[in-house]
Image (cartoon, helix red, strand yellow):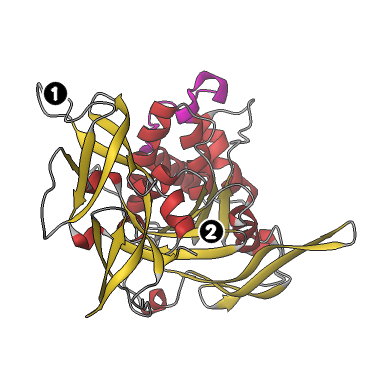
Amino acid sequence: MTETQHAPLRDDPGRAEDAVPAIELAGVRKEYHAYGETVAAVREVDLAIAQGEFFSLLGPSGCGKTTTMRMIAGFEEPTAGEVYLHGDSVTGVPANKRDVNMVFQSYALFPHMSVFENVAFGLRRRRTPKAEITERVTEMLEIVDLTGREKRRPTELSGGQQQRVALARALVNRPRALLLDEPLGALDLKLRQAMQVELKRIQREVGITFVYVTHDQGEALTMSDRIAVMNDGLVEQLGTPREIYERPASKFVAGFIGTSNLLSGDAVETGDGRAVLKHGDGGCIEVALREGQSVATGDKVELTVRPEKMQITPDDPGDGLCRVHGTVSEVVYLGTSTNYNVTTNAGADVVVFVQNAMNAEDVARRGDAVWLSWEPQHSYLIGSAV
């Protein structure tokens, strides 16, 4: 092992107990009662998070993601269902008895203490031997790239450095899981993007399960091994970032994760796990059906396709591709790409992202009649349009 490498904080990651989920929620529900009404913040959530996984709970404000995390941490108790940590039920176990730590958006560092003492605080409370404290704090500060700043106070650090101190303080106690509630929300965009990469590096280096709550799709896509997209207290879709982005399971997921075009059409041909839809005058869209989906001829259905999958041309691209006809309503130059807003002849508003090549001219101008085309495998059915 080189000087820049560190052993994971958990020994022997291949041991048998790792087959047991690090965190499991079984039928978890959380209700609140106010003004004579019962509100379900979380509704029958089932999740299994693997040991060493970077798992994100993603969704808009009020979707139940923070409440779910607080039930894992022990700050809230479920109204129904069970929470398990490494196979053991912790429902009813107080937060300070659960082998997890939590990092909040406000880092809550002690301003009168040095970086070293902030990180060492939990170890001193546990009466850890002095030599071990020095060794573990030094190792953790190296992992979060704060070596040489041990004697500084939090006010002498940047926002990103303060966030790393908070991480080091949470990790130095060697929890079995770390829960992070939008910890990058207070940082500016450029620093937040840099810290996303750093967080993933730190998680991979220490080998601890991270559960990350965010409403920022970019954060979740950048860092996560898997993502649970939540809406109105339910998990709408669970999968890898690629699965969720490329194959959204619902209209909500398609709209929330990135930019997605929603198109509707009448099924004119079905069979062999596919359907062919008519969209407006001359528009023909082929869509693959996932397991459990069925479409009958004449059904009006809705599908999604990502803007970067589309091509924009002045002429009909011909058979073999999905294609719709429309008119360019706006052209927005963004440096690395140009966005074309197109209204199809069936009245749908569509966005197309075109990567800008060197010295490239606009492929179309506002008011031009154009054809949009894409490969059939990039169309995904998301339900009835009725």
- In this rendering, the answer to whether 69 lies above or below 22 is above
Report if residue 107 is visible in the image.
yes
- In contact (CB < 8 Å): disc 2 and disc 1: no
Q: Which of the marked residues, 2 or 1, is nearer the chain's N terminus?
A: 2
Give the Cα distance between marks 2 and 1: 41 Å
| Callout 1 secondary element | loop
Residue 12 percent across, percent down from the top left: 33, 68
User: Is residue 224 rendered magenta in the image?
Assistant: no
Residue 293 position by quadrant: bottom left
Give the labeled residue for mark 1.
361
Query: Which one is in front, 65 or 199?
Result: 65
Q: Residues within 10 Å of mark 2 (few under 14, many from 20)?
A: many
User: Is residue 149 rendered magenta in the image?
Assistant: yes
Instruction: Count how many numbered circles sit on residues in the image.
Output: 2
Which span of residues is magenta-colored?
142-161
Residue 99 position by quadrant: bottom right
Q: Magenta part mainly helix, strand or loop?
A: loop
Circle 2: residue type? Met
Circle 1: residue type? Glu
Residue in the image at 11% along x and 49% along y = 317
Give the labeled residue for mark 2.
230
Q: Viewed as shown, does residue 146 lie left or right of 23?
A: left
- In this rendering, the answer to whether 82 lies above or below 223 is below
| Callout 2 secondary element | strand
Residue in the image at 48% along x and 23% along y = 158
Q: Residues within 10 Å of mark 1 (few under 14, many from 20)?
A: few
